[in-house]
Structures are given as structure tokens and as C-alpha cells.
Amino acid sequence: MLKRSISPFALLLTSVSAILGSGWLFAAYYTSELAGPSAILAWLIGGSAAIIIAFVFAELCAMLPITGSSTRIPYYTHGTLVSFLFAWIIWLTYASFASTEVQAVLQYFSYFFPSLVQSNAGLTGFGYFLATLLMLAISALNVFSLRWLLRCNNVLTLLKIAIPVIVALVILAVYFSPHQLLHPGHSSFMPYGMHGVFAAVSGGGIVFAFNGFKQACEMAGEAKKPARALPFAVIGSVIVCLIVYLLLQFAFLTSIIPSNLIHGWSHLALPGGTSPLTAVAHQGHLDILLPVLYAGAVIGPMAAALMYTSSAARSLYGMSKSHHIPPLFQRLLHGNPVVAIITNFLLGMSLFAPLPGWNSMITFLTSLIALTYGIGPICLLTLRKQLPDYQRPFKLPFVTVWATFAFYLCTLLTYWSGWAVISKLGIALVVGLLVLFIHRAFISPDERVPLNAKAALWVWPYLVGVTLISYLGDYGGGKGVIPPGWDFGVIGLFCIMIMWLALKFRLPTILTQHYMKDGDFTHQPPEQETDGTQEPAFAQHG
């Protein structure tokens, strides 16, 4: 077992560090384009949704404080196939983060070095070269120096909080006046209605910006006093970061001047818009702010990239340990899964071309993130049925209503990312299933773990249903067959049906208890390749 050595405050900082990656550098700009001044409302909706979902994970992880909970808890409730599907989505999410954060760094530096990016914010040849070097550096640090870097996490996190707050306060000090939010000719607080607000929640980077609160859940097995530490870290991290993001959004809105709105909010005329806060600083002659801003533009994204690359390696290792993918991914170097890290590097490099620019990347990631959240409410209600008398140090009231509403929110967040994104997500899931079944075809029957296919019967209607509703809906290139407003009701009824199916096809209690006692699903490799008694470097940190 891992040593419980992480304090509640350190756990909080771990989640805050994961949340404050590159989101604060871009989200205020993209949410403003989609929603105008009502971007403030979009942040409140997104933050409230994150808090509601965070409470679900607070109960789950306080009840089962285990490392790698995102894949292990679905295994306990619905078995191997469901666990693999969500492990695959989680791996894709974590592995995609490094390229997203590298894109953020290069996009910001393109303000001074335009040769780094094209007009659509995609990378040039020189940009690809630098991206390759940064991705290689992240991978190498994960193999050789991750422990030392993670020891610096508390200091880095305090800097990651301080820098955006300083940037926001300086912008407010220069620009703020009561009339700056609503401009003549563009005086509507909600220029694109609620459709724009909801689109901003998913497509503007808000869901992406809050991703990271689950890092505390992934490290639950290493937390001191998990019953108190996990709710504190999970919910506290969302609240702290919501305050930071609201401050930044308000500062950005007050910095907009009439000449920026010549073509309306949807086409903000902000010179150097690929690096929005830099453009705002130059516009206000705030060059003194640039050293602080660019320190944050490197520290935040690169620290987050290092953390998520480690988590992605753990995810691949775990799938290999569970016999879902070849044992090749369990190979270690300096106590870290080197083949998994190389695979993550190759996947990350492959994303720069089909997803040009930070906004394209995070829109795709948003659908993945929302799907990974959706399993939480289902597991919560299922465990209440399977293990009603199990000790729960933190217990949600009105759990049926709370969990169903949280699941509804997760599905809405996926839906709002739009058809163009969800169609790509379907391809990613098909690839994952092919990997699973091809691997099973080449291993001996003794190595094949039971799929628990019956317990996965609810997953297929859910994935097909979300795809169909998105195709018929009004977001991201959907056909618009389902009118705005009606989609809320359609998705609500759909989620109630899926929740009922997920509860109906849950694993029998006796099988859940057996899996929880089975030590084979621990995902903990040996410290050295020849010593099977200790955990490796990557397993000792989230």
C-alpha cells in the first residue's frame, strides 16, 4: 500500500495546480467571443456545475480512498468493460493535455515571434520543431526527474495562484470604470442569448479550466485523514479557482475598448488575439506587466503538462496491469513506465495538426472531460445500492436527486461541446475497443479477465444517444432538428433512463465485494524492474 503522507493543504494545492494550467491565459477571451459580457454568467454556471459534480467525487473518494480511483471505482460497480472504456477516455484526456499546454506556451510567445503559428493558430514548421523539443523535455523529466519536480509543487502552485491574480488586479487598476462592461452599440449584456452562454461553458474553455479537481481523488490513497482531506481538497480547489477565474474575466471585460468591438463580440478586434492577455497589456501600455504574465504563461502550462503526463503514464500502466493492453506498457526505467511515456509523446505530437490552436484542442478535450465526470454520479448511486451499510465519512443528502442532476449536468456539458467534436469522440472510442479486443484475441484464455458485458449494457445506449442528440441538436454543426430549449427536456429524460439502466445492470453485491478485496487491481508496479516490493516514482504522486 502507498504511504498516507499527503496533508489536506498539499492535496488542495495539487488540485489547484492541476486546474490552473493554461485555462486562465485564454478562457476569458474565448468566453467573451461566445457570450460577450454574459461570460461572467457562463463562469458562474460552469463553476456551480463543477462544485455539484465535485461533491459527488468527494463522497466517492472519502468512502474509497484509493489511488487511481477514476478507473477502479467503475470496476467495482460495473466491471471490466465499463472500467476499460472510462480508463481509455481518461488516458486520452490526460495524454492530450501535454500538447494543449505546449500549444498554449507557443501561442503566447507568438505575439513576439509570429513565425511560431499560422493565422488559424496552428503551428508552423518552426513551431512544430519547438513543440517537439518541449514535448521531449516533458517526457524526459517524467522519466528522470519527476520526484524532484513534484516536491516543488507547493511553491509552484502558490505562484500559479498569485500570477493571474496580480495580472487581473493590474488590468482592473488601469481600465476599470462602471461603463466599461457595456459599450454604445454593443450594450446588450447577453448579445447571443443563453445559447451563447451555454456554448461558452463548453467551447470557451470553462469546463477545461476547471478540470483538475479530480487530481485529489486520484491521490486519495496517499492522503492523511482522507475523510476530511478529500472533500476539503476537491470542493475547495474549485471554489479557489472560480474566484481567480471570475476576477480575470471581469478584468478582461473591462479592458475592452470600443475599437475592439468594430465587428461585435464574436469577432473581437484584439491585435495579437492568439495571446489575448498580452494584447490587453500592450493595448493599455502595461509592458511592465509582461515579465509576470510570461512567467505565468510558462510555469502554469508546463507544470500542468508534467502532472498530466505522469497521470497519463499511470493510466496506460493500469490498463496493461489489468490485461487490457499488452504488458509492454509495464516496462520501467528509473521506476517510471518508459514505454507508456513514449506512447503519450507520440499521441501528443499527433494532435497538433488535426486540432490547430488552443481553442480547437480544449473544445475536443471538454467532451472527454465531461464524459469522465459522468461516471461519478452513476457509481455513487450504484454503490448506495450495492453497499448501503458501507462507512461513508462524507455523505451527500438527497443522493438520488443530487447524483441524477450531476449526471444530467455532465451530459449537457458534453452536448454543448457540439456535433463536430462529439463525432471525433466516437472515433476515439471505436479505436479503444479495437485495441481491447485485438489484444484479447492474442492472449491466452487464462489471461483474459471477465468482461462483465451484461453490466455494460447501459453504456452503449448512452454513447449512441449522446451522439444522436448532438447530431440533431443546435451546437457545433448539429442539424438543429431539436429546437433550443427542447434539448434540455430531451437530455433530462434521456439521463433518467440511462441512470435507471445503469442501476439495473450493476454488478451483484457479492461480486463488487470480491473485486474490492482482490489485490490484483492495484495498478502498483515495482520500484525497480527486479524488485516487486515497492511502488515506482510515478505511483507515489498524482
Image (cartoon, rainbow, N blue to C red):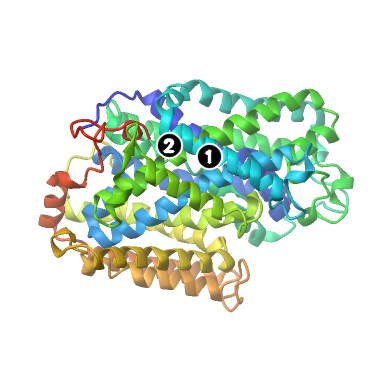
- What distance separates the C-alpha of mark 2 from that of mark 1? 34 Å
Residue 525 image point, x, y percent = 25, 39
Examine the rendered structure and indicate whether residue 490 appears above or below residue 283. below
Name the residue carrying label 2. Answer: 235
Q: Is residue 44 visible?
A: no
SS under mark 2 = helix
SS under mark 1 = helix
Residue at point 85%, 56% (across, down): 263
Examine the rendered structure and indicate whether residue 479 appears above or below residue 268. below
Residue 540 image point, x, y percent = 32, 31
Front residue (pair 472, 352): 352
Nearest-to-viewer mark from 2 and 1: 1
Residue at point 62%, 32% (across, down): 298
Name the residue carrying label 1. Answer: 136
Residue 82 image point, x, y percent = 29, 60
Left/right of residue 161 with respect to residue 338 in the rendered view: right
Left/right of residue 404 with respect to residue 159 in the rendered view: left
- Of the residues shown, which amino acid type is indicated by label 1? Leu
Q: Is residue 273 visible?
A: yes
